[in-house]
Image (cartoon, rainbow, N blue to C red):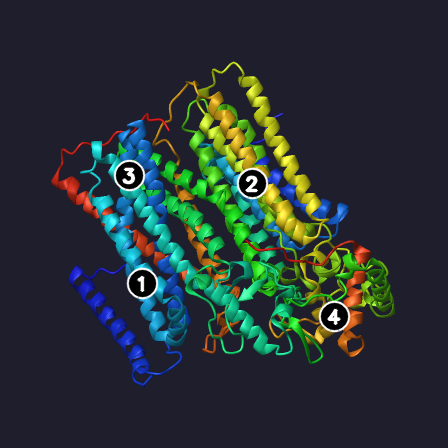
Amino acid sequence: MKKPSLFTICFVIFILCWVFLRFFIGGVISKPIPNSVILMYMALVFIAILVHISVEDTRFREFLRPIHETLVDENRSTRRLVFAVLIPLLMCGFTYTNIAKKANPPGDPRTVHPTPPDNLMYKDIVLGTMDKAENPFRHYEKDNPEAYKSHIENGRTVYYQNCFYCHGDHLDGKGHFADALNPLPANFQDPGVLPNFSESFFFWRISKGGPGMPASGTPWNSAMPIWEDYLTQDEIWEVILFLSDYTGYKPRTFGEGH
Amino acid sequence: MCRCSSQTKKRIFLIIGFVLLGFVLFSIVPAFAQDMTDAEYRPFPMIGSRNAAWIAAQLHLLFGAFILGVPMFAVIIEFIGWKTKEERYDRMAQEFIKLCMGAFSTTALLGGVLVFILLWCYPKVMSKLSGIFGPTMIFYVVLFFGETFTLYLYSYGWDKMQGRHKGWHLFLGVLLNVWGTAIMFVSNTWLTYQTSPATQYGKLSEKAKEGWLEYTLSQNPELTRAEVLKDVTDATVTNLHNETTGEFLGTVWDAVNNFTWMPVNIHRLIGNIAFGGSIVAAYAAFRFLVAKTKEEKAHYDWMGYNGNFIALCGLIPLPFAGYWLGREIYMFNNTMGVNMMGALFSWLFIIQAVMIGILFIGANYYLWSGMGRIEGAEKYARYRPIMIAIIVICVGIWMTPRTLSSISTASEQSAMGGSNHPHLGWFGLMTAKNTVVNIVILTTFLSFLFYRRSGKHPTANWKNLGNIVISSIFFLGVVVIVVIGIVGFAVESDVRVNVLTPWQVLVALAVMVVVTIIDIFMYRKATTSGTIKWGGMTDRSQYVLILLAITFTSLMGLMGYARSGLREGWHIFGVMKDTSVDAYTPSLSSAVNMVSIIMVIFFALVGFIFWLGLWGEKKKQKAVPTMETETLAEGND
């Protein structure tokens, strides 16, 4: 059997990578990957192939040979004709799918993590600057474990009375109402949620809810209620303690600088 | 095509020139036609104050980075030439300094333009800053004189100070770097202070401590001094201003030693080396591409290799320094940190990942191409596909955004169950990104190791054992870095930032240091099977060098936007509000456009300066047709 050309091998590798991302990662072992991300990864695959074939002159010439033959070889007129038809057709198809198809609603361009204000507020009371305000019960973790536990229990009660409908029994964002919401409720079991933000940030998000989001980065469209209208300051701090205790992830703290 | 005579063409250009000049003058006139003696802000004609200051500052910074970076490695190369008695190193170092001389006056000129723009457009801000930093500005002038005259002596004295005076010449080179570094450190104080006008309590002067205490007591009359100081430790972030009036409470040193000063100093110092190396490499690449003789090609091939090597030396530690700077920004102000990495500027860091990915892929490509001109390097070619795969996968992880809401449709979001992909979303977290950065760095180091070994055969009788040890160190290093990365998902951020990430960095550095030491001993008495055919590089590899310089420039521009934009609506964060018409943070797309324009201007200016050098050279060659051409073919690295 005739050995396939380097161009064919590269082409097959390229297609296999796309199939792997689109159908294996984005289908068999996980959820579908957005096209833009696949495009980004495929650009890298293309670069990798380009690097590999062009580092050495001999290999680069070998890669270009079939292209050159197709373009100038007299015996390849049929192949030329096929490409002359196929390439414009593919371009037409690509253009059509990208321009004519309008059925999809536009994506939600919001920033997931909004810019918090300078001061942390509960209703009209300033609790301190955002980077200095602290959970008043956090120190009990070391000073008074019993009191700490009781605050966590209070937080648990608050959570299951108010939050679990959306954020779920297991704090994984899969509550009863979750499927009806867009954006989806936060998943506190995700390691990228609690450890990346301070307790003051969560206090702000809970107390001000969706309507309290900043003017920049809109539209937020968050269905989160303004919880300061229903919960006390202590209850909000307690529910944050509970989130941390249940998931095992601690909100971000800041050590010493240089 | 126009068939008009050259005379007519000249007339057309002259008319166009006059029309443009008239347009500029008419646009400027209204700005000067009103009394703005006491104005807080004065508009810059046509493009606006912020854009004018942005362009001038960025161009000044790019030229400044070049003229500060180049002498650092020029003096090292000169030293190598002196010690090895190889004249070509000395010649190359001199050529670097010649490039520097051309750029020096442009840097000063742009600095002057920037100051004039700032004084005209932002008089109140400049008044505030000069009120605090006045003494440092005088110091800056002294340093600038020192640098100017040392550079003149160093450059013009090059040929005179050979032989027994070489030691003194090298001393001048070192002195030049001391001046240059000091100048950068001084000017960094002004801009870092604007971002982080605070420091830690333990570092404050007694005057600042007292001022802060009095201010706090005035704000909380019910408290006593002891009560205020009860929770204050040496690490407590302390503002240097009365937060109500904006009055400065400290000394000049307090303002200088602000939160982000030293991280920016170190980041820029290393960045300048990488940037300078890449510009020199791009210059060499251009000269290689237009070279007419084999000797010229050989020379500029060698110069390009050295430029790229220097850029790599700077590039490898650069992410570590950047990480430290990022950490300090979080330490200074939590909100600013969240804004930087998780909100307003987060997409900028995805672009940054793409660009640094290009830098690493490009640098490796150049090294692999270079191995093509070394006899005996073929045996390492089989590892190349694996290394390409590792680098590309790591870059892919690095550039994967945490949140995909901005780049996915509603149906895609619904299909993946939200704005985060359930599995790829993990790549968006810092622990994953830090892990792959370290692996990319180690792979690049391995490429360099292969390059260094190419064409050489170790004679040490423990070479097999040595190779096993080196392979094991690499393997273990990567395993440890990956394990630390995985653990990073499960620990609290404080531990990850302050313990795990530094350990990853230390492991990567340790691998590079230990492997280098073993390799040096292993190849100490190595025999060579072939020589490097300087001048034998492909043209493609030279375009990669130019691409690297462009990428470095864009990256510096974009990250400058992040550093400056982090202040958002403040001239001095938390102290002095920006109340001008430009008091908004430009979008990422506006910033990209602006940086692109600046980049085009920068390369046009650099091209002009280099062309002037070339022009002078050609004139000299015409005047002295029998001048000996340097032959560097068949050289060795």
- Separation of marks 2 and 4 at Cα, in angstroms: 40 Å
Please state which of the two labelled residues, at mark 3 or mark 1, is closer to the viewer: 1
Q: Which residue is mark 2?
A: B440
Looking at the rendered image, the disc whose residue lies closer to the viewer, 1 or 2, is 1
The three-letter amino acid code for the residue at tag 1 is Ile
User: In whole angstroms, how far apart are the C-alphas of marks 1 and 2?
Assistant: 44 Å
Amino acid type, mark 2: Val
Which comes before the other along the chain, label 3 or label 1?
Answer: 1
Q: Could you say which disc has been placed on residue B431 in the image?
A: none
Residue A60 versus residue B45 in the image, above or below: above
The disc label shown at residue A206, or none: 4
Residue B72 in which image quadrant:
top left
Numbered disc 3: secondary structure? helix
On the image, the x and y values in percent for residue B334 come to 61, 63
- Label 4: few (<14), some or many (≥20) within 10 Å? many
Q: Position of residue A110 (x, y in %)?
A: 64, 67
| Residue in front for this viewpoint, B146 or B427 | B146
Same-chain check, marks 3 and 4: no
Badge 1 is on which residue? Answer: B138
Density class for disc 3 (Cα within 10 Å; few <14, some 14-19, many ≥20) is many
Mark carried by residue B170: 3
